[in-house]
Amino acid sequence: MPNKEYPFFIKSTVVLFGLILLTYTLLNLRDILTPLAFALIISILLNPLVNRFLRFKMPKMMAIILAMFIALVLIAGLIFFLSSQIAQFGESAPLLTQKFNHLLVEGQNWLQQDFGIDVQKQMQLLNEAMNSSKAVIAQTLGTALGILGVVVLIPVYVFLLLWNKTRILNFLYEVFAEEHSRKVADVLSETKMAIQGYMVGLLIEAAIVATLNSTALLILGVKYAILFGVLGALLNMIPYLGGIIAILLPVLMATITKDGYSTQLGIIGAYAIIQFIDNNFLVPNIVSSKVQINALVSIIIVLLGGALWGISGMFLSIPFLAIIKIIFDRIDDLKPWGRLLGDDIPMVHRRGKQFWKKSNKKTLGEEVVKDLES
């Protein structure tokens, strides 16, 4: 019996309804799904290390616990370092507040003299802006507290996902028809390698960017250069938008602590050079080549992730979009969507046909994962 072909308006309506239902589900279950999503990414990241321990004839439970312990030590070390830097920052907070108030008074006088906006009107506009931002601040704090509330669940989820890895893989193989088993195996293998290579490469890239940021800020004489350098590298993990915030923080500090504007211009110039090096050399050669999402889609998906899951959604949006792209690239009917999401350059054949230029060169992140797996 031939398959019935439905009209386009019926198909589009069903797809739109499915997207609305998916968005509603993601929004209302974010407190449950956010730690599970982080645990899935972390478990994929730790899987090569667990496999390496298993090859040394280590018991499975011990291998998982040891891999998780190493990850926790590294995270605790980063948190301790940032906490010590923030504590030093807090010691000079009164002086910074005094300097900021002085700059605020100068700014008010400048607006009143050059633009005719009196101080009372300025305070009214400022109060209106603060009132309108209260909801955003409350939502951000709620998201942060929600993360802190469920952070204890993430290690539990990670352990259980790694412990039940074989059962989950067998389920994915069995749920599809036998003739699709090869395609399912390719999708799972490529997804695992892409996410592992992406996350490992992202950590290496962040370490290099943190070093470059801190060195530039130290040369320019910016206070708390190492703190702002590391924070800038962490914010840089949020594509495009994070880089802008990373520049604003040291510029604001230089404005408060230094006279004139030469340091601010130096910071903008140094960060522009670092961003150029990062985008043209570090990302193509270190971060996974299989997770190349074009700029337009990256910005849109990061904003959508922030609207759904807050800051966590911004960090998780790109890895999960990469998984979706890999699946699209493996299904014939969805390949155009995979090309739309990707950053491959379409080349025109001399006969007028298009083909897509792809790079098969392994990045540093993928090489590190391969060494751990071998």
Image (cartoon, rainbow, N blue to C red):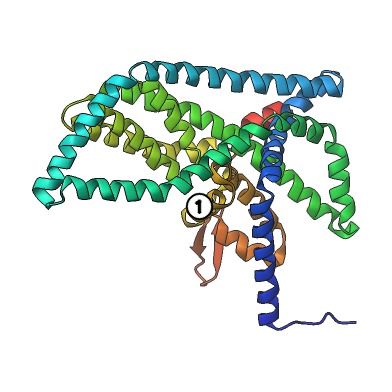
* Quadrant the N terminus occupies: bottom right
Task: Give left or right: position of 107 versus 129.
Answer: left
Mark 1 residue type: Leu
Q: Do we see residue 218 in this rendering?
A: no
Sort mark 1 into few (<14), some (14-19) or many (20+) by Cα contacts within 10 Å.
Answer: some
Counting from the top left corner in percent of width and height, residue 187 is at 74, 50
Residue situated in front as seen by the camera: 35 or 315: 35
The residue sitting at 49% across, 19% down in the picture is: 83
Counting from the top left corner in percent of width and height, residue 112 is at 13, 47
The residue that mark 1 highlights is 303
Residue situated in front as seen by the camera: 6 or 338: 6
Instruction: Judge whether 223 appears above or below 320 on screen.
Output: above
The residue sitting at 66% across, 21% down in the picture is: 72
Counting from the top left corner in percent of width and height, residue 144 is at 56, 36
Residue situated in front as seen by the camera: 224 or 196: 224
The residue sitting at 43% across, 37% down in the picture is: 278
